[in-house]
Amino acid sequence: MSDAWTAYWNRGEAMDGRLWQAQCDFFVSRVRKEIPLGPDDVLLDIGCGRGYTAEALAPELRAAHGADTSLHALEEARLRCAGIPGLTFHLLAPDAYLDIHRLPVRNVSVIFCVSVVQYYKNIGEVRTLIANAKKIAAPGCRMLLADLLVDYNGCLDVAGVLIGGLESGTFCAKLQEVFSGKHRLYGRTRAEHPVLTMRRAELEAVCAAENTRLRFIRRNLTGNRFRAHALIEILPAVNAC
Ligand SMILES: C[S@@+](CC[C@H](N)C(=O)[O-])C[C@H]1O[C@@H](n2cnc3c(N)ncnc32)[C@H](O)[C@@H]1O
């Protein structure tokens, strides 16, 4: 991630709070159908933002951790969630955001990384993230990289944002996101530091190289039907005899 994206996400007004909460509520309601969660699970939500997803799920899990490069988002999450047992937020250094294995988090059974990978620099960083996830993963850990720009088509993607707004009753807010000044800042940042798009085959190759099993989830998890969601199962290491 470039310094420009770090600065963008550290701005308080980077994204409307109600819209962000609504998107996380939508994600939580959908993801449960794909990834069963229970009292033995330990969740790490990478790029947790204001922590809505971890907050919603924490009461039913053994532990929930949110991690983000945005101090501003984390401060809000910590304030709002103070007192929720088993819920912890961690700052990822902007120059070492892939180092999730350095967080005080172990035996993670579920990893979410939702609407974050597009701010990575290249597919090699995705591979490093998966490699580091393996260092803190419990056996059979499920890692979800959601809202990916796989086989990307820009027009379809904007259509997906607006259709999603219609479906969730947040159309006006989405339209505002697309056309407001905030969005112009997003657009300027994006023009100078393009978001990461990838071919499906590239992600498949990365997952195979890291000895993980990849499956794309067809259900719409994030409100944009044209985004891709990769569920990566971290396989137990095979010890050489
Ligand atoms: C679009 S928001 C998504 C937030 C949340 N995951 C959700 O689904 O609502 C992107 C978040 O990812 C964070 N972020 C961006 N790049 C990141 C990186 N390389 N590592 C960790 N967090 C990152 C931003 O600070 C921001 O909070």
Image: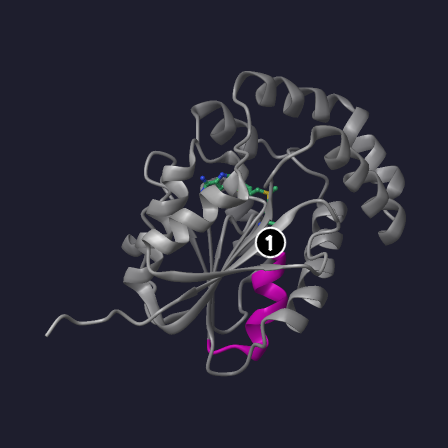
Q: Residue at x 75, y 21 (%)?
A: 181
Q: Quadrant of the N terminus?
A: top left
Furthest residue toward front:
201
| Residue drawn at (33%, 60%) of the image | 211
- Among the 4 quarters of the image, the one containing residue 194: top right
Q: Quadrant of ligand 1?
A: top right
**Residue at the image position 66 percent from the left and 21 percent from the top:** 187
Whole-percent x, y for residue 105 in the image:
34, 64
* In magenta stretch: residue 50: no
Q: Is residue 172 left or right of residue 117?
A: right
Q: Is residue 171 above or below residue 179?
A: below
Instruction: Give the residue at x 37% y 49%.
Output: 129
Residue 28 location in percent, x, y?
67, 64
Q: Which residue is outermost to the bottom? A: 39
Residue in the foreground of this view, choosing between 175 and 216: 216
Magenta part of the chain: 51-62
Please identify the quarter of the rendering in which residue 141 is found.
bottom left
Instruction: List the residue tagged with mark 1.
Output: 229
